[in-house]
Image: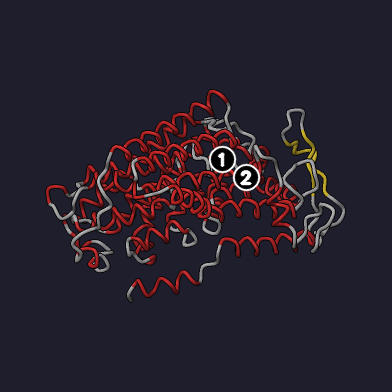
């Protein structure tokens, strides 16, 4: 079967993230009428006291139409969207996500990233300039770093449009392009020490300082990236020597039959300035968080400064032929691309509020669920509980691929559960980020994955048939790191 014709049928059967959230909301609403909420007492330290749990005598039952600050079935999205304050929680997170999306929309509109890649990979029609394994490995490291630093994901789609055709015409295949561009970003995302979209949000919800536990995560990123490099080198060399071994050999013929990629222009001084500004901003953010305690509001302002500077450079050097209006539209478009992720954060929070909220000392079904799960894990060793958290996060990520949304939905439960079961909160966050990132590689609900597959003209079923073994290896490695984290009391 032609993969290009099979894909729409596959994708049409996959529910949208918001549909999944609506189903979860209906389940949550029904649960409020079936089960009694509970509350925990708090120890002097502010942590949950497992011995001080009490449950309501009867189910409370959420209203259909909530009034007077009641959260019901029809108003849970609004209540979730407006909860919190500007510095944290839902409102702050949504604003943060939109600003970051707009900034990178401006950077991508200047074309600086595209021209930098074209300068690196050269002209594929010239055999002397064809990329070898070393350059491919270099791109893998760069994209893994981008995933770790700023959660690069959807941005890989545009890059795949450039890199994949070049690699195919240079003797590799579109799977090599997927490994280089997309899988690298997800490895970086999973093992990140500073990703603002997943890790920082999960740490905030769990009551941990931003970027805490950085040393362990940097080592983890090096190990995961090293493992990815080793596999990519082996696979790319194997396909280059024997192209017919590729599962994508037939579908890649459309790339091999074309003569050129299409010019994006020469890499110039303006492009170099923008890339330097990006690196300086990353260093500025790291310094601000570590030395000054910067959080969402300050980090958003730092990246907004980057967007302004990149826009000025793009206008002065006329990068991509942009004018001022183009840059403003690029900011709007970039924010619009991440608007669904921001909305997911709010809607997920609304579901939690309908269940009674995430405060341990207030009546909530989350507390009742937490108490029940703690009873189930009481007979398990702590390392088994940590592995269970990893498995839970990996499974739910197949349904909710938004890192920020998954953090908002699961960490209010996982963080206190870790207290009750003896797992450190930092280990619980580690299980979240590994589970949240790695299964993005096969999640058909991921817009970034489906977009990169479309950019490489690679069928989802072809990709799944190839990637399940490498993914299994990555999950085993993730389980090993979670085990080590728990054994050393990672905090």
Secondary structure type for disc 2: helix
Along the line of sight, which residue is nearer the eye, 58 or 488? 58
Q: Callout 2: 10 Å neighbours few (<14), some, many (20+)?
A: many
Q: Give the position of the C terminus as an image quadrant.
A: top right
Q: Residue at x 19, y 46 (%)?
A: 132
**Extreme-top residue of the structure:** 291
User: Residue 448 location, x and y as percent?
Assistant: 44, 56
Q: Give the position of the N terminus as an image quadrant.
A: bottom left
Q: How many marks?
A: 2
Residue 53 seen by the camera: yes
Secondary structure type for disc 1: helix
Along the line of sight, which residue is nearer the eye, 267 or 198? 267
User: Residue 136 location, x and y as percent?
Assistant: 26, 46
Along the line of sight, which residue is nearer the eye, 228 or 408? 408
Q: Residue at x 73, y 51 (%)?
A: 353
In the visual, does 456 lie left or right of 424? Answer: left
**Residue of label 1:** 429
Disc 1 and disc 2 in contact, CB within 8 angstroms: yes
Q: Callout 1: 10 Å neighbours few (<14), some, many (20+)?
A: many
Q: Tell me: residue 126, above or below residue 269.
A: below
Residue 480 seen by the camera: no
- Of label 1 and label 2, which has the lower sequence position? 2
In the visual, does 334 lie left or right of 358? Answer: left
**Residue of label 2:** 411
Q: Quadrant of residue 244?
A: bottom left
The residues bearing labels 1 and 2 have C-alpha atoms spaced at a distance of 8 Å
User: Residue 86 location, x and y as percent?
Assistant: 66, 39
In the visual, does 188 lie left or right of 302? Answer: left
User: Residue 482 location, x and y as percent?
Assistant: 50, 40
């Amino acid at each position: 079967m032609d993969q290009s014709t099979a894909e729409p049928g596959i994708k049409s059967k996959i529910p949208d993230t918001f549909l999944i959230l609506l189903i979860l909301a209906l389940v949550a609403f029904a649960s409020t009428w079936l089960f009694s909420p509970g509350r925990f007492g708090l120890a002097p330290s502010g942590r949950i006291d497992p011995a001080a749990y009490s449950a309501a005598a009867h189910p409370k039952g959420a209203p259909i139409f909530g009034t007077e600050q009641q959260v019901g079935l029809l108003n849970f999205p609004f209540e979730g969207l407006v909860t919190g304050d500007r510095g944290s929680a839902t409102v702050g997170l949504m604003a943060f996500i939109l600003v970051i999306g707009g900034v990178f929309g401006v950077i991508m509109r200047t074309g600086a990233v595209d021209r930098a890649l074209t300068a690196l990979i050269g002209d594929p029609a010239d055999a002397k300039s064809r990329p070898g394994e070393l350059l491919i490995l270099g791109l893998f490291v760069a994209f893994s770093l981008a995933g770790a630093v700023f959660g690069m994901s959807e941005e890989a789609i545009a890059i795949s449009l450039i890199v994949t055709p070049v690699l195919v015409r240079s003797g590799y295949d579109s799977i090599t392009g997927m490994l280089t561009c997309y899988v690298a970003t997800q490895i970086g995302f999973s093992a990140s020490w500073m990703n603002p979209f997943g890790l920082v949000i999960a740490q905030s919800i769990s009551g941990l300082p931003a970027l805490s536990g950085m040393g362990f995560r940097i080592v983890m990123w090096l190990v995961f990236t090293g493992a990815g490099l080793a596999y990519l080198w082996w696979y790319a060399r194997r396909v280059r020597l024997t192209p017919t071994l590729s599962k994508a050999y037939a579908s890649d013929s459309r790339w091999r039959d074309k003569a050129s990629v299409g010019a994006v222009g020469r890499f110039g001084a303006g492009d170099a300035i923008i890339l330097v500004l990006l690196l300086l901003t990353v260093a500025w953010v790291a310094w601000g968080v570590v030395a000054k305690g910067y959080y969402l509001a300050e980090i958003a302002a730092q990246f907004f400064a980057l967007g302004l500077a990149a826009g000025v450079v793009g206008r002065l050097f006329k990068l991509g032929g942009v004018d001022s209006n183009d840059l403003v539209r690029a900011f709007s478009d970039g924010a619009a691309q991440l608007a669904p992720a921001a909305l997911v954060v709010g809607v997920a929070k609304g579901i939690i509020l309908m269940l009674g909220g995430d405060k341990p000392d207030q009546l909530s079904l989350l507390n009742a669920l937490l108490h029940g799960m703690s009873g189930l894990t009481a007979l398990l060793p702590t390392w088994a509980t940590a592995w269970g958290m990893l498995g839970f996060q990996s499974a739910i990520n197949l349904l909710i691929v938004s890192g920020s949304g998954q953090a908002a939905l699961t960490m209010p439960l996982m963080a206190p559960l870790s207290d009750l079961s003896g797992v450190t909160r930092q280990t619980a966050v580690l299980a979240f980020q590994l589970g949240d990132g790695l299964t993005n590689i096969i999640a058909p609900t991921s817009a970034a994955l489906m977009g990169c597959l479309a950019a490489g003209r690679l069928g989802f079923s072809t990709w799944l048939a190839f990637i399940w073994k490498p993914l299994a290896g990555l999950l085993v490695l993730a389980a090993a790191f979670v085990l080590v984290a728990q054994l050393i009391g990672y905090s």
